[in-house]
Structure formats: C-alpha cells, structure tokens
Image: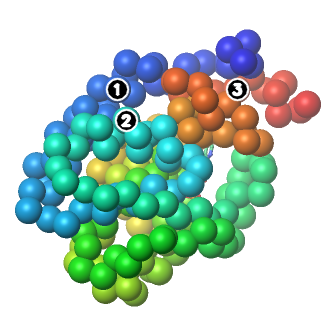
Amino acid sequence: MENDLKEILLTESEIQDICQQLGEQITKDYQSKDLLCVGILKGSVLFMSDLIKRLDLPLAIDFMDVSSYHGGTESTGEVQILKDLSTSIENKDILIIEDILETGTTLKSIVGLLESRRVNSLEIVTLLDKPNRRKADIEAKYVGRKIPDEFVIGYGLDYQEKYRNLPYIGTLKPEIYNK
Ligand code: IMP
Ligand code: MG
C-alpha cells in the first residue's frame, strides 16, 4: 500500500497531536453539557476513536451514514441518508465528527436534519478542512488542519473504499487513478 503513495501529508504522530489539542479544547467547552458525539460513517471512524479518548467528559456516541460520493474523487452534491441515528437527540449537545469538510454539501444537509430535532446545541469537529472547495454555507467550529485542494487518503479516508486503514494521511500517485 505504501508504494501507492505520492506524499505523506500528516504523519501518525502529527495526527495524534491534533487529536490531543482538539480533545483539550472540546473538554473545556463541554463542561456540564450533555454531549453526544455523532460520527459520520465511514470516514470518521479512526479519528473519532482517537478523539473521544482525549475527551475527559461523560459522553455518548452514535453514528450516521450518508452518501455524497459515488466512488470517484469529486462530490456529486447529492446526499442520501443510509443510516440514521439510533437514539433521540432532543436537548442533547451534539458534536458531529467528520473526517474532512470539502464542499460542505454533506454536512449542510446533516446539520439541517439534526437541528430540526430540537437539539440543545450542535457543533462540528473535522480533522481536515479544504476551505477552497466550499460550496455550502457551513464551517466547522473545530478544525484539525486546513489542507490544499488535493484528494487525500488514509486514517479513515478512502479511494474506492481502500486505504482507510493507513495510520497516516497522504496523496496517491497519479497512476493509481488510471487503474
Ligand atoms: P463534501 O460534502 O464535499 O464536504 O464532502 C465530504 C465528504 O466527501 C467527506 O466526508 C469524505 O467522505 C469525502 N471526501 C472529500 N474529500 C475527500 C478526500 O480528499 N479524500 C477522501 N474522501 C473525501
Ligand atoms: Mg465522510
């Protein structure tokens, strides 16, 4: 797998440092709140498991699965709910955990849906942000790292469902896309 990489963007230890910093900040901000962390499947799974270990708070977790991508490297703008939350979120303080915020289409529709369920508060934490790609009017309160407009894989992020298990984040060699 490593041979498929062009460049490493974030090493394993850089990712862990980011999780630590975000964890400290979120722990401060969510004192005496009723926190429910909502992971967006499948990309956020690795980030979520590292981040919540750094939250020194009583919290619950749940997951949503949506699809906005259809196997390629460009967002189609269509969002479909594949799996909804399994618990009521009324009066909860929701923290959506995302791997990457790009056009914002995915998160915009998730936020709209969850806000209609009378939550107490709703914020977003994303490991990566590609601000130059934004189309929807949405920002994350907590951002791990802003990155340039380039397709990245690893640490939950996939290309055609592969590379999610890499412990770091990088870019792929151009020939991989032509296979
Ligand atoms: P958005 O709706 O355009 O913000 O897309 C967000 C979703 O697209 C993310 O949750 C990822 O699943 C996927 N995505 C966006 N950029 C990348 C990337 O560089 N690599 C892998 N997946 C990506
Ligand atoms: Mg995703």
> Residue at image x 50%, y 47%?
44
**Is the Cβ of the residue at disc 2 closer than 8 Å to that at disc 1?**
yes
Task: Name the quadrant containing residue 145.
Answer: top left
SS at mark 1 in the image: helix
Name the side, left or right, on which 95 lies relative to 133.
left
Please say whether residue 171 is visible from this viewpoint: yes
Q: Residues within 10 Å of mark 1 (few under 14, many from 20)?
A: some
Q: In the image as oriented, which residue stretches furthest toward the top?
A: 3
Q: Nearer the viewer, mark 3 or mark 1?
A: 1
> Residue at image x 72%, y 35%?
162
Task: Name the mark on residue 104.
Answer: none
Task: Name the mark on residue 172.
Answer: 3
Q: Is residue 41 above or below residue 12?
A: below
Give coordinates of residue 141: x percent, y percent. Answer: 28, 57
Amino acid type at image mark 2: Asp
Give coordinates of residue 64: x percent, y percent. Answer: 53, 64
Q: Residues within 10 Å of mark 2 (few under 14, many from 20)?
A: some
Q: Residue 116 versus residue 57: which sits nearer the camera? A: 57
Amino acid type at image mark 3: Leu
Q: Is residue 164 above or below residue 80?
A: above
Distance between the Cα atoms at labels 3 and 2? Answer: 24 Å
